[in-house]
Image (tube, helix red, strand yellow):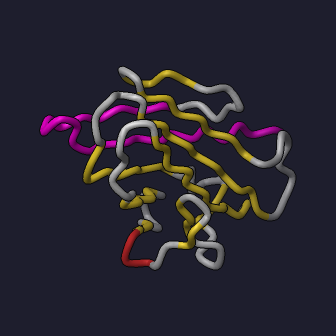
Amino acid sequence: MATTLINSANFSGTLDEQFLTFASNQVSTNTLSVANNFTETEEGEQPCWISGCLQYSICVANDTGKSFNNVTMTDTIDISIAKFDFTYGVAVNGTQLSQVNYEYDRVSGLLTVALPNMPTNTMADVTFQVVKI
């Protein structure tokens, strides 16, 4: 029986001293325009996930002309079919984060990641893995 894994990534931070939040609920290889001059791409490394680990890559780009600061990304993992891979952890722009920069709630499946400030014309590429239950 096939099960669809839905991924929902949310971003929040300050832009020009105003709080901003935006979200996407699509795993895709397409770039989505999710807010004024922000784009976000989510992709899983496997088109058909049978077993083992699945690596997510969530990339958000800031083309607003302003710095996006105090950025947080949250992503809810469907705990009925997958669990967060603590061995892999979380990487941002290819650098593994220490656990003080991310938090995972095993009960709700909520992954919270503190991202670096994003000056205009920069991006943050967040990767993590889940393991099929």
Residue name at image x 48 percent, y 37 percent: 61
Quick check: 53 above or below 3? below
Quadrant where the image shows the C terminus = bottom right
Q: Is residue 1 visible?
A: no
Give how far across and how far down residue 128 sits, in percent.
61, 61
Quadrant where the image shows the N terminus = top right
Q: Is residue 120 visible?
A: yes
Please say whether residue 115 is one of the residues in the magenta stretch.
Answer: no
Residue name at image x 26 percent, y 53 percent: 70
Quick check: 86 above or below 40? below
Is most of the magenta stretch helix, strand or loop? strand
Q: Quadrant of residue 105?
A: bottom left
Q: Quadrant of residue 53?
A: bottom right
Give how far across and how far down residue 51 sits, in percent.
84, 59
Q: Quadrant of residue 2?
A: top right
In this picture, residue 80 sits left or right of residue 102:
right
In this picture, residue 7 sits left or right of residue 116:
right
Give how far across and how far down residue 75 sits, in percent.
47, 49
Residue name at image x 55 percent, y 66 percent: 90
Q: Quick one: 10 or 123, which is closer to the camera?
A: 123
Please say whether residue 10 is one of the residues in the magenta stretch.
Answer: yes
Residue sitting at the far left: 17
Residue name at image x 35 percent, y 32 percent: 22
Q: Quick one: 86 or 29, which is closer to the camera?
A: 29
Quick check: 43 above or below 33? below
Number of labels in the image equals: 0
Residue interval drawn in magenta? 1-24
In this picture, residue 14 sits left or right of residue 61:
left
In this picture, residue 132 sits left or right of residue 26:
right
